[in-house]
Amino acid sequence: MVELAGEILQSREALGSLARITPQNLQKEFRGLGVAKACRIAAAIELGRRVGSAEVAGEVMDDPSKVELAIGAELRKKDREEVWALLLNTKLRLIRKVQISRGSVNETAVQPQDLLRQALGSETVYALVAVHNHPSGDPAPSPADLEFTRRLRDGAKAVGVVLQDHVIIGVAREGRAGYYSFREAGYL
């Protein structure tokens, strides 16, 4: 089993790509692997993702690496672009995650007011982090991402909600993080 785990890890460019693995994919890639063992491996990967996600509930979301820990594994396994809002209290602690939109492999239709509506609909929400994935794995922002972030920043300011960050989730590669943070890049 240890040898098989090593083979599975070597077959992936990045650990984040394990999130999309299915029992069917395992059986296709690794000849002779039975259904039961493939399901156990996929279940172990999913359990690890869920444990990691549960550990950050209520955590302070003041750094994009914490945002990535909170939702990155979940979004990396998606084959469609999704936009989520992480809703935060006055101490920037995570209250809840809300899926806002699900689109195609390279875009999703979403407006700033879709995220702001979630924040304004709760008395306890002080700030939010916009998060979306790039199924291609490249977290670099598109011109549309830049424009959306500008509009969201302006809208949040107008209604008194703190836009803590906008984070794009991709896959880590050598010399590149698995995310892009608009705050780190100086846009917020």
Image (cartoon, rainbow, N blue to C red):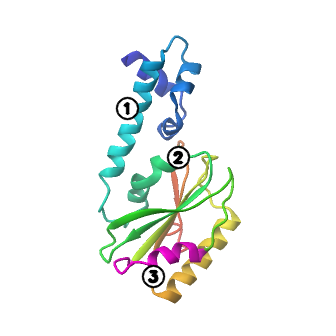
Residue 112 is situated, as x and y percent measured from the top left of the image, at: 59, 75
Task: Please name the predominant secondary structure of the magenta segment in the image.
Answer: helix
Give percent across and percent down for residue 177: 50, 50
The residue type indicated by label 2 comes to Arg
Residue toward you, 124 or 13: 124
Q: Say if 45 sits above or below 1 in the image.
A: below
Residue range in magenta is 112-126
* Residue 82 image-quadrant placement: bottom right
Q: Which residue is mark 3?
A: 161
Q: Nearer the viewer, mark 2 or mark 1?
A: 1
Q: Which residue is mark 1?
A: 44
Residue at horizontal 53%, vertical 43%? 77
Q: Is residue 118 magenta?
A: yes
- N-term-proximal mark, 3 vs 2: 2
Q: Are the residues flagged by discs 2 and 1 in contact, CB closer than 8 Å?
A: no
Q: Earlier in the sequence, mark 1 or mark 3?
A: 1
| Alpha carbons under labels 3 and 2: distance apart | 27 Å
Callout 3 secondary element: loop
**Viewer-nearest residue: 84 or 14:** 84
Residue under numbered circle 2: 76
Q: Sequence order check: which comes first, mark 2 or mark 1? A: 1
Q: CA distance from mark 1 to mark 3?
A: 38 Å
